[in-house]
Image (cartoon, helix red, strand yellow):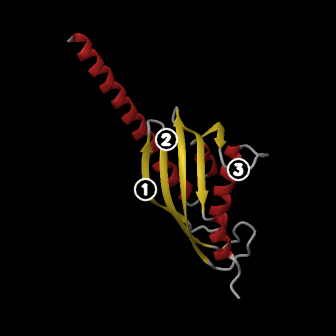
Amino acid sequence: MNKLKLAAAGAALALSTAVAGATEATDLLSKFYEVADSRPFDRAKLAEFYADDMVDHNGHGGQSAKQSALDTFTALAAGAPDSRHELGMIEPVGDDKVLIYWRYKGTNTDGLFGSEANGNAFDIAGFEVYRVEDGKIREFWHVEELASMGEQLATKK
């Protein structure tokens, strides 16, 4: 009987630890998006969320994943200062990952990703999975509607 109680207590502890880890990860990512969308944009504050050796599983090499992510958020804030993420879903996946579905909306008022500033509004969706460890983003996977964004940013004729 004691072995059964010990096993049940161990399982409960493991489950509560996983739930605590998942909650910490979802809280971290919620705060991450608040900082990413804050204006004026604070690159140094956003950098604190990333591990220096973070891995972007959809990255294209060359630059570190952390620097590439920071450059992307810097460009978004500069080219579309009114842009914001609307988090439609933020769900734990296991004890260290978070799945996020978002819509990203804004206006190209200051030139975004090489397109001229033309006042075009954009609205795209994306999914991201982040793995969090020791309070830092260690890995992420992502899919965004970049082709749609390009079309929306194109100069209207």
Number of residues whose C-alpha sits closer than 10 Å to that of mark 2, classed few (under 14), some (14–19) or many (20 or more): many
Secondary element at image label 1: strand
Secondary element at image label 3: helix
131 versus 59 height, above or below: above
Instruction: Give the label, 3 or 2, closer to the camera.
Output: 2
Circle 1 is placed at which residue position? 89
Q: Is residue 24 found left or right of 120 in the rendered image?
A: left
Three-letter residue code for mark 2: Lys
12 versus 32 height, above or below: above
Number of residues whose C-alpha sits closer than 10 Å to that of mark 1, classed few (under 14), some (14–19) or many (20 or more): few
- Residue found at x 44% / y 38%: 94
Instruction: Give the label, 1 or 3, closer to the camera.
Output: 1
- Mark closer to the chain start, 3 or 2: 3
Secondary element at image label 2: strand
Image spot of residue 61 (x, y percent): 76, 46
Circle 3 is placed at which residue position? 68
